[in-house]
Image (cartoon, grey):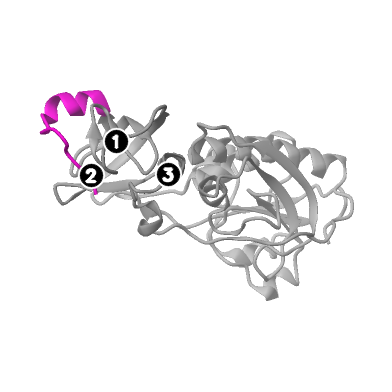
Amino acid sequence: MPPDRPRRIAFAGTPHDAVPALRTLAEAGFEIPVVVTGAARRRTRRGSDTLSPVAAAAEELGLPVSHDPADLAGCGADCAVVVAYGQLIGEDLLATTPMLNLHFSLLPRWRGAAPVERALLAGDDRTGVSLMALEATLDTGPVYWRHEVPIGPADTAAELRNRLAREGAQHLAGSLTGGLGTPQSQSGEPTYARKLTPADRQIDWSQPAAHIHRQIRVGGAWTTLDGERFIIRGATLQSGEAAASPGTLVDDAVATGDGLILLRTVQPAGRAALDAHDWLRGARLPPATRFG
């Protein structure tokens, strides 16, 4: 286990979700001897390799960057903090350096790769952030604290991740400064948040409107129109029953198994996202057009 009040803290993380924790630790005055992150990679088909968000933030903060997780043990840190690093850390490394993991769920619910998305898809009314001692097995370590966050009826996965990242970073710095205390073994029935596949994001219009709305709020929900993929980026639930078959376009809404989904932002194949009203005006679709 790490010391109760560590001062020299190595950091491992890669995406935007990990940046608030790194910045907050630096602003709180902790010594950060190394930041381990994913290597630079091409993020668009025609673009050049770009740094990970954590690498870019570390360079801005003047912190040394590494792509080798072994450096977490070789820097003389009191402990390491891991936030959405994206790679498994081996048991041999865990045996040499105590590590803390900031995980975006109320463990043991939603262990795994996509806890925010799975909580949203399942219709959970709350989620949160947990700080646990990192173990070689998947998100099973004892927990120092859990911070609960409500899930609003219109919250998107991106909005939730941003909120969890910010609030989790503040709680992390506060606990490291004020004393970690003794972690407690996880209790309750675990659930597992496997990574979402394209099939998880495909809309079945015969499903209830609330379920489809959650898919859209997760991000990347898609259907088909005239045989081509059609992404729905934003939508709201519309009151009233659907007087049409599921998948049928009714003015600027789509019929589902039990109601209507009002389109807000859409992305037809080969185009950028645009306002649904603008798309409908230009598309000149025939009556009773159907998706899927």
Q: Residues within 10 Å of mark 3 (few under 14, many from 20)?
A: some
> Which sits earlier in the primary sequence, circle 1 or circle 2?
1
Front residue of 286/190: it is 286
Q: Say the numbered circle drawn on residue 291.
A: 2
Quickly name the residue at label 1. 254
Side of 34 relative to 188 (left or right): left
- Label 1 sits on what residue type? Val
Quickly name the residue at label 3. 208
Q: Marks 3 and 2: which is nearer the front?
A: 3
Q: Which residues are magenta?
A: 275-292
Side of 152 relative to 167 (left or right): left
**Element type where label 3 sits in the image:** loop
271, above or below 187, in the image? above
> Which sits earlier in the primary sequence, circle 3 or circle 2?
3
Q: Residue furthest bottom?
A: 92
Q: Residues within 10 Å of mark 2 (few under 14, many from 20)?
A: many
Is residue 157 among the parts visible in the rendering? yes
**Image coordinates for residue 263, horizontal then vertical, percent:** 32, 31
> Which sits earlier in the primary sequence, circle 1 or circle 3?
3
**Image coordinates for residue 220, horizontal then vertical, percent:** 36, 45
- Label 2 sits on what residue type? Phe
Residue, x 41% and y 30% (percent of image)? 236
Is residue 77 among the parts visible in the rendering? no
Magenta span includes 248: no
Disc 1 versus disc 3: distance between alpha carbons? 12 Å
